[in-house]
Amino acid sequence: MTAAQLGFYGCLICHYVTECAPGTTDMRCRRCGALLHRRKPNSIGRTWALLLTGYLLYIPANVLPVMHTGSLFSTQSDTIMSGIVYLWTSGSWYLAAVVFIASIFVPAAKLAVLTFLVISVQRRSTWGPLDRTKMYRVVEFIGRWSMLDIFVVTILVALVRLQSLATISVGLGAVAFGAVVVLTMVAAGQFDPRLIWDPQADAHSFRDNTHGHS
């Protein structure tokens, strides 16, 4: 038995739990007055829209230059991967690993995990709801620190070999990368993890009703 089946609704704004009478259409939070919903409205559709946009921007984030370095003698454009290669070949393999994990692996992993969760909810899968909930919590926790990915990109600026009178400008890759970080954070916020447990509750209710009639 879930809280929603018992008539308890959690406010998405202040997180206050309100008991609503059966058949009530205009349910509002007793604390802040916000409109209550059993589940986040259009959670799946909004999450898909954000994820697809994140996938599209993930490509230019890693292909386009994140910075342009110029001097009196030469100019250079660096992508995230070229920065990783430079750090690795210059002997800073540990920094190269940090940049790769934070800027390449983590955003891709967040997109993949959220995609898996959305597809499993759409297919009303009953597999491992606790495991999937833990996966969501990990993604949500990492999302709080996603801006560290942007900070890691700035390390490339600090560690690149600058010549005299050099200048640095941000490339479109950094803009796309920042957009991917924000989109994954918002997508995790739009996804409703309670949807993971709904098929499980429906299956229990069906079995209970079947046993009751028998």
Image: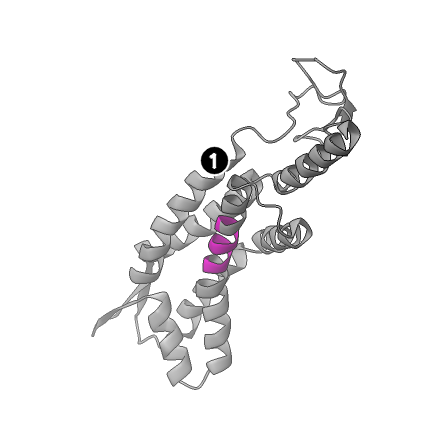
State the residue at coordinates (46%, 34%): 45
Residue placed furthest toward the front: 214
Depth check, front residue: 176 or 190: 190
Q: Quadrant of the C terminus?
A: top right
Relative height, residue 185 to residue 90 (above, below): above
The answer to whether residue 65 shows anywhere in this view is: no
Residue type at tag 1 = Arg
Please tell me whether mark 1 sits on a helix, a strand or a loop. Answer: helix
Residue 125 in the figure: left or right of residue 79: right
Q: Residue 82's x, y, as percent?
A: 33, 72
Relative height, residue 32 to residue 62 (above, below): above
Q: Residue 75's x, y, as percent?
A: 23, 69
Residue placed furthest toward the left: 73
The residue beneath circle 1 is 46
State the residue at coordinates (47%, 35%): 46
| Neighbours of disc 1 within 10 Å: few (<14), some (14-19), many (20+) | some
State the residue at coordinates (64%, 20%): 35
Give the magenta part as a residue range.
Answer: 108-115
| Residue 33 among those drawn in magenta | no
Residue 164 in the figure: left or right of residue 8: left
Depth check, front residue: 119 or 40: 119
Residue 4 in the figure: left or right of residue 105: right
Dominant secondary structure of the magenta stretch? helix
The answer to whether residue 44 shows anywhere in this view is: yes
Q: How many marks?
A: 1
| Residue 112 among those drawn in magenta | yes
Q: Residue 110's x, y, as percent?
A: 51, 55
